[in-house]
Image (cartoon, rainbow, N blue to C red):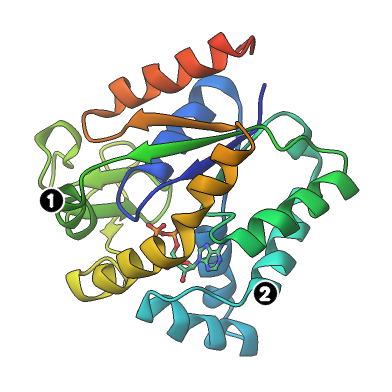
Amino acid sequence: MKNIILIAAPGAGKGTLAKSLKEKYDYVHISTGDLLRDAVSKGDELGLKIKDILAQGLLVEDEIVYQVLKNRLQEADCKNGIIMDGFPRNVNQAVKYEEILSDINIDLGVAILLDIEESKLIERITGRRLCSQCGEIYNIYNPAIAPKVENICNKCGSALYQRSDDNEEALKSRYATYVEKTQPLIDYYKNKNNLYIVDSGKELHYTLEQVEKILNDLGDELD
Ligand code: ADP
């Protein structure tokens, strides 16, 4: 399976898409946001430093991200096919990513941009609820993916929570950071002839079908 890099504004649906590709095809889903939040939950010195940066919607220092990411990429399952969600997030990281991958003999794969109108992001972010146990993603404003019982996971019955940076204020800063730092990646991968664009403004199955078509057209045998 081809490795995938997902590029998108916060709330565009990277995590949701990655989760469904993982469930369907056995991809490994690597979210640097999740890796960093795990580091925060350890509560050590590094965790405390990261916590403030996440709350402000700014980017964590590249070196810290490389450290958590490298550890993850060295695990054996990454040979199957990986989906990068939230990394690289600036051009420096993209260059460094190629170095890291070549050291461990993993292909770059394809970059996929999830395209969505900015106006749809607020509802997706402020309505997002996550399961504390199984990680299922819900949105209270979208009946198709709202929890059946308020604040309870449909799948495992555990309590749902809201990410501390999923509010309008932090979204403004996350979106500005995206435009400034992450959008230049679009040109970076376009120049490498390695950028594919899908519409992520509708329901998940529609986004998923577009991605499957891209991978199939590239000769990828999804299984
Ligand atoms: P989203 O993309 O929806 O904002 P993520 O879970 O991917 O959510 O990221 C949450 C936060 O984690 C970001 O706002 C940023 O502070 C930090 N982060 C995630 N990935 C990176 C990265 N590659 N480089 C720097 N900071 C990152």
State the image quarter where residue 69 is shown: bottom right
Is 151 in front, or is 125?
125
Is 126 in front, or is 189?
189
Does ligand 1 reach within 8 Å of label 2's beta carbon? yes
**Residue 149 visible within the image:** yes
Query: To which residue does mark 2 refer?
Result: 64
Query: To which residue does mark 1 refer?
Result: 150
Q: Secondary structure at mark 1?
A: loop
Q: Nearer the viewer, mark 1 or mark 2?
A: 2
Measured in 3D between alpha carbons, the distance from the residue under mark 1 to the one under mark 2, in whole angstroms, is 36 Å
Q: Residue at x 56, y 58 (%)?
A: 32
Amino acid tagged 2: Ile
Q: Residue at x 20, y 36 (%)?
A: 145
Q: Secondary structure at mark 2?
A: helix
Q: Residue at x 55, y 88 (%)?
A: 49
Looking at the image, residue 4 lies above or below residue 134: above
State the image quarter where residue 127 is shown: bottom left
Amino acid tagged 1: Glu
Q: Residue at x 65, y 64 (%)?
A: 92
**Residue 85 visible within the image:** no
Q: Are marks 1 and 2 in contact (CB under 8 Å)?
A: no
Q: Position of residue 113 (x, y in %)?
A: 43, 38
Quarter of the figure with the N terminus: top right
Query: Left or right: 127 with respect to 3?
Result: left
Looking at the image, residue 199 lies above or below residue 7: above
Q: Position of residue 153 (x, y in %)?
A: 27, 45
Residue extending furthest front?
191
